[in-house]
Amino acid sequence: MPVLSKAARESGRTENVFQYADESAFLEHFITKPIYEWFSGWDQKVIEEMKLQEEPFYAYDAFAYRRSDHMYIPSSDCFEFLDTQDSDIMDGTDEHILYEKMIVLDQDNYCKVRKYIIENPIITIDKRREMSLELADNPAAKEAFQFAYEEITDDFYPCPCCGWTMIHGKYGYNCHSTHCIDITPEFSESDKISCSNSTLFRLKKGIMRYFAAPGKLELEIATYCDKKKIQYALWPQMDRYDVEIRFSDGELWEIDAKAYHNPIALRTKIQNDNGFPAGDYAKGFFVIPDEYVQNQRNYTAIINRILTGQNNVKCVTLRSLKMEINRKEESLYEKK
């Protein structure tokens, strides 16, 4: 980060840059600390003058957890930070390859494969064959579906948080997200699923993180529309939006569901994407899970401050979106 080098020079802390220049020293002294702690001992005046507190990276928590003397596990904040970078970092990853395979599908098959992936983080070999046969007439869709999964080779515990595989190894539990590990209780031996007697498949880790986990929020919005008997479409215009809602008076709402625990990460991602996608809609919403505001009550305010150029767009929790939908439905009922 060039801004860090500049801040180090102006703060007179350049010795730190060279002292921890090698990888092992950097990991030991910085990677397991929240980013704001990296500046401990720096000249506060320089920090304020350079407005480091306003830099996107400043609010991130530690980028890794230490599992042993020489073992570090990347944190969810680390992956969220990487996802906001306007670079080729994500090229070549499983999630990027899957997207390239899916984006060429027609709308129906795109939705079929994506919904299946979200709803089925773990499948049996029989389920894999069944879905493959269902997609047999569309080789590209079948290839995308099969690419998303890998065989499970280790015994595991079904993760109660996300439904993926929680595996206990030498350095503790491991799931697709460190957030799962933080809130998951200890398992008993009876919870463990053995792979010795059956062949099971799971989503590849990056696909679970970037496709399936955020997709749960998208399907929850769709389920609520079903309950209210409101017309909707998932991933319309080949995923330009996540959910499109059309009310009985023809009014159109577009929704982009986001699963960034860190509001600064989401803010940076939105800015890199130049805001909410343009379109002919009455309202647009960035929607986050309700639990994200429990420990960060100003989450939506942080996002909404950068949406000044789009007056019909705002960031809301899932609960708030449901309230907006209810108010719209009530207004339509009163007009009858």
Image (cartoon, rainbow, N blue to C red):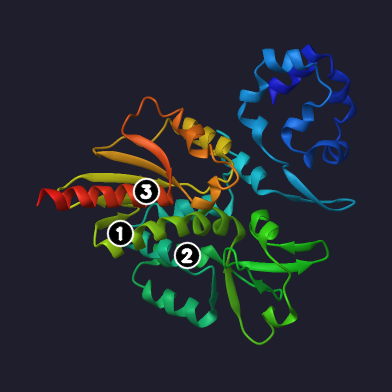
Name the residue at 58% across, 44% down: 90
Name the residue at 30% across, 59% down: 225
Amino acid type at image mark 3: Leu
1 vs 3, front mark: 3
- Label 2 vs label 1: CA separation? 21 Å
Label number found at residue 117: 2
Amino acid type at image mark 2: Ile
For residue 106, which quarter of the picture? bottom left
Amino acid type at image mark 1: Cys
Label 3: how many Cα within 10 Å (few below 14, some 14–19, many 20+): some
Where is residue 201 shown, x and y percent of the image? 58, 73
Q: Evaluate if marks 1 and 3 touch, with contact meaning CB atoms under 8 Å apart.
A: no
Where is residue 86 shown, x and y percent of the image? 55, 33
Name the residue at 47% across, 52% down: 99
Decide if residue 6 is in sight here: no
In terms of sequence position, does the residue under pointer 1 or pointer 3 come before the other? 1
For residue 134, which quarter of the picture? bottom left
- Reading the image, the residue beneath label 3 is 321
Decide if residue 155 is in sight here: yes
Question: Is residue 87 shown above or below 328?
Answer: above
- Label 1 vs label 3: CA separation? 11 Å
SS state under label 3:
helix
SS state under label 1:
helix
Where is residue 118 shown, x and y percent of the image? 47, 63
Label number found at residue 225: 1
Q: Is residue 117 left or right of residue 329?
A: right
Q: Is residue 62 left or right of residue 79?
A: right
